Every structure is written in C-alpha cells, then in structure tokens.
Amino acid sequence: MDKIWHNQRTDGSEYWALSINGERYTIWEKDLIADIKEGDLVEFAFTFSGRYRNLTGIRRLASSAFTTADKLVSDPTSLRITRMNCLRTAAEMLKDTTLLPEQKVSLAITMAQQLENHVLGNPENSELQEVMRQKEDDWPDLQDQQEGGA
C-alpha cells in the first residue's frame, strides 16, 4: 500500500483513493480500509467501472505471507538475468507467429513482464490484455544487455 487519501465529490459523497504498486484504486466503504495503513502489504480485488478501478475487497497480509521479488533477487545483476530469461522465453513463444515485427516486440515485452512477475512471485493480473506499466529506467538496461550479449 503506497498511499491512501480521502476525497469528496461535489455532491458531498466521500470516497478514498489508494495507490497500490503505482496504480490508483477507489473505494467507497471506509470500513473496508479501517485497518489498512500506508506501507502495509495487502491483497485486494477490484472491478473496472469505465476508466476507474473500484476495490471490492482488501485485506492486510502478514509481511511473510508470500515471497517478494526483493527476497528472491537480491542484486541488480540477478534481476537483469531473470528479465533476460523471461524475454528470451517470450520471444521463443512468438517466433512462429505471423505478427508484424513491432507487434511481436510489444507482445514479447508484455509477456516477459508477466513471466517475470510469475517467476518472482509478484501477485499481478495475469491476463495478457492488461498491459503492465513499463518502467522506463529498467528496460533500457535490459536492451543494452541484450545488444551487448547477443
């Protein structure tokens, strides 16, 4: 849980906005977040309502409830190796497709990110259509390593 803040609509109704892993969610029932604090490890469910993500449930987890990426990959080199393996696997899966090259690149990156989250035990949405946000500072390193090592 990155951040929680209170909001109010012009009609006076209250809601809360939450930032979880850099994504914004809203919740209308204060009781559902009564024991949640910034910095907590949480498990949650949500639905889309237009462009909004509305939480339908949330609970705080014990810090040892699951293994996080920082426990599995303790240094940047190991993380780069993991990412390269995931990218290589995604590219191999797409090699016989008839997609355009730019489509293959986009899809391979999305698939690699999903594979990385699975390998590292990050609880993320696994549907291919839900494209994960690409971290601009991480992928150039991967591209540099790919060009240098190939």
Image (cartoon, rainbow, N blue to C red):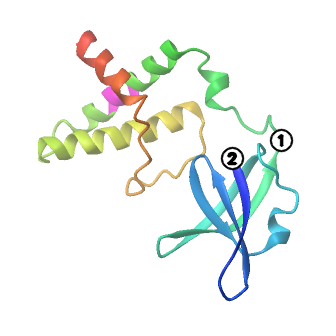
- Residue 150, located in which quarter of the rendered image? top left
- Residue with the mark numbered 2: 2
Q: Where is residue 10 in the image (x, y as percent from the top left)?
A: 65, 84
Q: Main secondary structure of the magenta part?
A: helix
Residue type at mark 2 is: Asp
- Residue 6, located in which quarter of the rendered image? bottom right
- Residue with the mark numbered 1: 62
Position of 89 relative to 102 (above/below): above
Taking the spot 27% from the left edge, 37% from the top edge, the residue there is 93
Position of 11 relative to 105 (above/below): below
Question: Which one is nearer the viewer's eye here, 53 or 78?
Answer: 53
Q: How many labels does the image show?
A: 2
Q: Which residue lies furthest to the front in this view?
A: 10
Q: Residue furthest right?
A: 35
Question: Residue 76 lies in magenta, yes or no?
Answer: no
**Dot 1: few (<14), some (14–19), or many (≥20) neighbours within 10 Å?**
few
In the image, taking residue 32 as reference, residue 119 lies left or right, namely left
State which region is magenta.
Answer: 85-89
Q: Where is residue 99 in the image (x, y as percent from the top left)?
A: 14, 48
Position of 22 relative to 87 (above/below): below
Q: Where is residue 148 in the image (x, y as percent from the top left)?
A: 26, 11
- Distance of mark 2 from mark 1, alpha carbons? 16 Å
Taking the spot 78% from the left edge, 39% from the top edge, the residue there is 65
In the image, taking residue 83 as reference, residue 35 lies left or right, namely right
Q: Nearer the viewer, mark 2 or mark 1?
A: 2
Residue type at mark 1 is: Ala
Q: Position of residue 116 (x, y in %)?
A: 47, 33
Question: Which one is nearer the viewer's eye here, 69 or 133?
Answer: 133
In the image, taking residue 35 as reference, residue 42 lies left or right, namely left
